[in-house]
Structure formats: structure tokens, C-alpha cells
Amino acid sequence: MVTYMYASLPSLEEIWAWLDSVSDPEIPILSVVDLGIVRNVRWTEEGPDFTTEQTSPRENPTSVIDGRLRRPGTQRTRRSDLTLLVTVTPTYSGCPAMAVIKNDIQRALLQRGISRVSFETQLSPAWTTDWMTERGRKRLREYGIAPPEPHYDKLGLASEARSTGIPCPRCGSSDTRLVSRFGSTPCKAFYICNSCLEPFDYFKCH
Amino acid sequence: MPLTLLKNHRLEFVLRLADNCLILSQRLGEWCGHGPELEEDMALTNIALDLNGQAQNWLEYASELEGGQRTPDRLAFLRDAAEFRNCLLLEQPNRDYAYTIARQFYFDTWHSLLLTDLLGSTDQRIREISEKSLKEVRYHLRHSSGWVIRLGDGTDESNRRIQTAIDELWGYTGELYTPDTVDETVCAERIGSDLSTIRSDWLTAVHHILTEATLRVPESSWMHTGGKQGIHTEELGYLLAEMQFLQRAYPQAQW
């Protein structure tokens, strides 16, 4: 692990690029940026203890990491006192991946020398699959998961109500049918293609 | 209304929302590995997970409203039955699949109506959690309504079983929409909802689905109450004994 002090703070563009290397633990071909889970990053003068969530110290191990980094006698510069505040939004209320995602983000940033990180959870506006990047959709399809349809179709019908017509990620046919609205993870539904007969996951519209 | 009292009403109201989700989540979790088919096993546990997450969001807020005296985990795992504020419907046992579906259908219909109304709450945190939850609850409602129709309009056996469940659980639904002092106070402040509106919308929606399912709508009857005030059926004690076992046996154990 390389840790060093920055002569100047890394730009937010650089930080976004680093975050883009953090994979979603359940669907590793997507980054947390592709998914739209990271809503904002900014520097703040508040300490890493500052967080709008009610988290216990074990859930927010920043201070431990920070403590491990600081060797005795190390002079801390004024700049390194700044904390990076990362605003995240959960995909599903009970998504068990959120804790892992925060840890992964923290580790990725630490590897780039940012030891002081705080998280802020933002519930509103609620996460939607409409925030998924085009690149994310393309990657999903290549991976064999049908990407989420836009929230409303041309007729204004909520796509979550549809049970047919989700294009098969393998053969591209729209002749598919819903098996179950609930799949292997909270974000997926289970379909079967009537043309190629392959079952597939659909990243459901949310 | 003195401010402290209002704060307590807000806290009570939030605890009810939290406990409804938490207790039903625990009940649904009991189906894990026992579902009638694989897809349903996964559906019920997915719904349980959503509700567990929603309960966590509400309990975090409740914990803050209390001034942080108890963490959300403490509220979930170290309160005894009389301190729980869920409606009696949600603690009723799973019994067969028809019961589980009927319970879910009654609740999902009410839950989606309530959360939709709470988008207009004067309390920002309540609005935010409702907005997040509602997206998930719409899926739950579609699932449980679909199964009520499928079972009702299915075989003689499935029709008989879902009708029995619909009839027997009917007496637990009144509590969902019968206001008490807490409900009236939060409604007056527009923190919460007017349950009489929710009631008529709920009746219309339930009537609609039951008719489509070729099921009889139960006659109005005497309604069980008490859950919202902490007076529960004996079922809750058994549920908590399992849900809270780890924290009771190994106090303060952490994941």
C-alpha cells in the first residue's frame, strides 16, 4: 500500500475516476459510479467523525485507519486535516451490499492516500435505475443481465408493471416472459427467453 | 399541545412504522428454505430483506428522536413484547401459504396507501424514508395481489384455503386504520396520515382484488386491537424469543 501526502489536494475529477474503479460486490462488472450509488464527493473541514448517520464506531472505522496511518512523530499538515465527504444512496433499503460498498470505497481512497473519509447517506431523491450510466447498461448486457428499462415507456406505463417484452441479453429477442419479480439479489427479477429458451436475470426498473 | 408530548407522539408513530416492518420481516424470514417453490422462497425472503431495511431506517430515526439513548439494534433486540408497537396482524403466524399471502396482501395494500400519503408529511425524514420504501412496497403489493388472485381463482382447494385465510385474518385489519390518540395527534400536525381516508381507499382496493380473485369480501366484524399500544397476542413473545435470542444469550455481541 502506498501512502503519501499530497502537495495539493487531488481534484474531484481524479477522485471520481478512482471511485469508478470500485466494483459493486454483487455485480462486479459494474462500478459504484455506473450504478449511481455515489451521489457526491466534497472536501470538508469537519473531522471524519462527522457523519449525518447514526453509526457506531465499528461501522465507521475511519479513525482506526487514520490512526494506523499516522506514525509517531509524523507532522500532519493542515491540508491532510480535510476530510473527504462521500454521499451515497442505497439501492434497496435492505441491500446487504451497502456496508461492503462503503468499506471498498474507503479502501480504494486509502490506497490513493486519502485517509480521512466520511460517509453521508442520502435517501431522497430515492435511488432509481434511471441513474445507471449508459456504459453500465452496456456492461450488464454483455455480462448476461438484461439492463433496466426506462421508468416509463412511451405510453407512460410504469415498466415495473410489465411482465413481457424485456429483451433477452443473449439472443436479443423480445419474446420473453417473467418467471418471478424477485431474483437472486434485491435488484433482479427472473425471466426466461421463449426464443432461445435461456433463463436470464433482469436488473429491474426501480 | 406541549412540545415534549408532540415529540413522543412522533416517536410512537415512527416506532409503529418500524415495528410493522421488523415483525413482518421476521415472520417472512421463517419461510427461508421452506417456500412452496424456489421462486417463492426467494420472493418472500427478498420482501423480508426490504422490510428489514425499512425497519432499520425507521429505527434509526426513532433512536434519534429518543436522543440516542438506545441504538437501533438495541431497539430491535432488547425491547420486550409490551414495548413493541406493531399491529397484531403482522405477528400472526405463517400457518400455510394462503395465510402468509393474505396477511401480506392486507398489509401491502395498507402500507402502500399510507406511504404514498406520507410523501406529504411535514416531517422531512418521514417523507424521505417513505419515498424510499414506497418503491419497494409497490413490488410487494404486486406480488401479494397476484397470488391472492391466483389462489382465489385457482383450484377448489386453493380457493377454499385463501378464503379461510382472508376471513380469519380480517378481524386483525381494523387496527391498521382505526386511529387512537397518537394517530389523531400526528394527523393533526400532518406528520402522519388521516386514517379514515386510508380506510376507505384500503376497502376499495381490497374489494377490487378479492372480487377479481372470485373471493367473498368478509362482513364487517369485531376487530382485535391493542398492538399499537403494546398489548399483543401471545404469538409475539415466541417470535421475539427467536429473533432476540443472540442478543439475550450474548449481550452486546456485535457482527
Image (tube, rainbow, N blue to C red):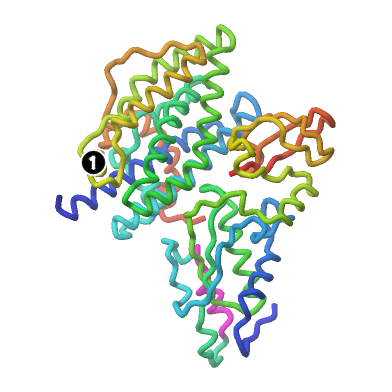
Q: Position of residue B90 (x, y in %)?
A: 40, 31
Overall secondary structure of the magenta section: helix
Residue A65, position as x, y percentages in the image:
56, 74
* Image: magenta residue range: A59-70
Vertical relation: A43 (above or below) A53 = below
Q: Can you give x and y, in whole percent of width and height, for residue A17 in the image?
A: 68, 70
Q: Residues within 10 Å of mark 1 (few under 14, many from 20)?
A: many
Residue lying at 37% horizontally and 28% vertically, measured from the top left: B201
Q: Secondary structure at mark 1?
A: helix
Query: For mark 1, what is the residue?
Result: B182
Q: Residue at 67% of width from left, 51% of height from top?
A: A26
Seen from the viewer's position, the closer of residues B56 and B178 is B178
- In magenta segment, residue A64: yes
Q: Residue A172 placed where, x, y %?
A: 81, 39
Snapshot quadrant of residue A5: bottom right
Q: Is residue A145 above or below residue B225?
A: below
Residue furthest out toward the left: B2
To which chain does the residue with label 1 belong? B
In this rendering, would A117 be left or right of B93? right
Residue type at the position of mark 1: Val
